[in-house]
Amino acid sequence: MTVLRAFKWTSVNKNCIAALALGMMTGFIAAYLILSPPEYIYQELSDPHTSSQLEGLAGPINDPGSHNNDEIFHRMENSSVADYLYQQVRVLCWVMTGPKNHEKKAKHVKNTWGKRCNILLFMSSQEDSSLPAVALPVKEGRNNLWAKTKEAFKYVYKHHMNEADWFLKADDDTYVILENLRYMLMVHSPSEPIYFGCRFKPFVKQGYMSGGAGYVLSKEALRRFVEEGVPNKTLCSQSASGSEDVEMGKCMERVHVTAGDSRDALGRGRFFPFVPEHHLIPGHVSKDFWYWKYIYYSSKEGMDCCSDNAVSFHYVSPNQMYVLEYLIYHLRPYGISYHVDMPTVTQEQTMEIAGNE
Ligand SMILES: *[C@@H]1O[C@H](CO)[C@@H](O)[C@H](O)[C@H]1NC(C)=O
Ligand SMILES: *[C@@H]1O[C@H](CO)[C@@H](O)[C@H](O)[C@H]1NC(C)=O
């Protein structure tokens, strides 16, 4: 009898708890679905997909140091073409960051891909000579990104205009392969009014370049932006807020800077708004995700997604920067080598050709 009662009790208890749990779960899921934008649901499936998700990811606690290049492969490596392009296609990189991220993110950009820029600057609101970071006269926060972008390009134009041919804007969670950027740019003249990046379709007639994947302005594009666009309210938004990349796109179009096609000869993209995994694994970026509506050129998922000469990836955590650095610049399959010839057409020759026409 006692046993039976006890049993009944537990069974009632179990049912109650199950019902309560079910109710709570349904409630939570409903609240979650109602309150969260689609992007947020997506996040649970994988690694960082938005800047805010990267916030918590601090960089390595211990300094990863540098890779010993005194290996047979590295000694056999021939970088003379890349070295030549470093001189011929000078790229100034400026990286959008903030005081909170100097240590957490900017430092790791400098330790990895940033060192391959001809000039590397971090745009912040606080100076830091070790990076170096520039203190721009702007407030921090998402609402000031457009103001910060304008100030950054103004600063670069004023102080470094003649020290580079191309001017790259990247975020502190963008990873850039500079050699491939120079290779793409080498057939263009810096006096062409053009800019390149991951081209998106909406809001601007000729499209605009995704902010996170980074975009690169020719010297002439920079001149037009700073001299003609920024000071003129009919050409560029005078507000501090607004989507930095969309505003940039509108402004570029109005000063007649062409939105360039950054795809390779096989039609594969070079600038990517997500980490490689999200482009390489089919279905990782779900079909109704905004990306597919935004992307200007039809692009594939899977192993054929990306150019062998890819230039950039976005939402790369500080740790992943070191992983990419290792995979791209150090890990080599034994017995496979490749050779590139010294390019015959450089930007100066392109300029001459253009001038002769
Ligand atoms: C601003 O741009 C418009 C359109 O190009 C032009 O007509 C106008 O003269 C410019 N204003 C100034 C102050 O330069
Ligand atoms: C390195 O590559 C360049 C370009 O192909 C070539 O001209 C040069 O002879 C190579 N140097 C060595 C040491 O193999």
Image: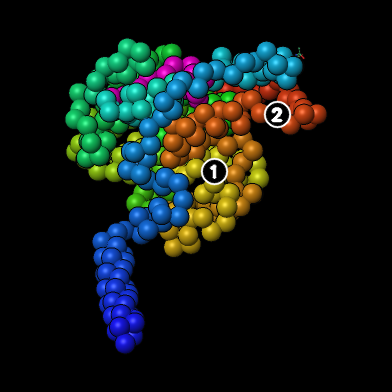
Specify start and end residues of the magenta stretch as a single range.
111-124
Left or right: residue 271 compared with residue 333: left
Magenta stretch encompasses residue 114: yes
Which of the two discs, 1 and 2, labels the residue nearer the N terminus?
A: 1
Type of amino acid at the residue the image marks with label 2: Arg
Picture quarter with the N terminus: bottom left
Residue visible at 19% across and 38% down?
239
Q: Going 38% across and 28% down the picture, which residue do you hit?
A: 105
- Residue 106 place in picture, x, y as percent: 38, 25
Color encoding of the figure: rainbow
* Residue that badge 2 annotates: 332
Callout 2: CB less than 8 Å from ligand 2:
no
Q: Which residue is mark 1?
A: 276
- Residue at far front of view: 1
Residue 15 location, quadrant: bottom left
Q: Nearer the viewer, residue 56 or 6?
A: 6
- Above or below, 146 against 126 in this view is below
Identify the image quadrant of the C terminus. Answer: top right
- Residue 204 lies, in percent from the top left, at 36, 49
Residue depicted at x 30% and y 83%: 2
Residue 125, percent from left and from top = 24, 24
Residue 313 image offset from top left, x and y in percent: 49, 38
The mark closer to the camera, 1 or 2, is: 2
Task: Determine contact: label 1, label 2, CB under 8 Å.
Answer: no
Q: Is residue 209 left or right of residue 99?
A: right
Q: Quadrant of ligand 2?
A: top right
Question: Is residue 18 found left or right of 305 in the rendered image?
Answer: left
Q: From what the image shows, is residue 121 above or below residue 325? A: above
Q: Is residue 233 left or right of residue 285?
A: left
What is the C-alpha distance between the residues marked 1 and 2?
19 Å
Is residue 63 visible in this depiction of the protein? Answer: yes
Q: Residues within 10 Å of mark 1 (few under 14, many from 20)?
A: some
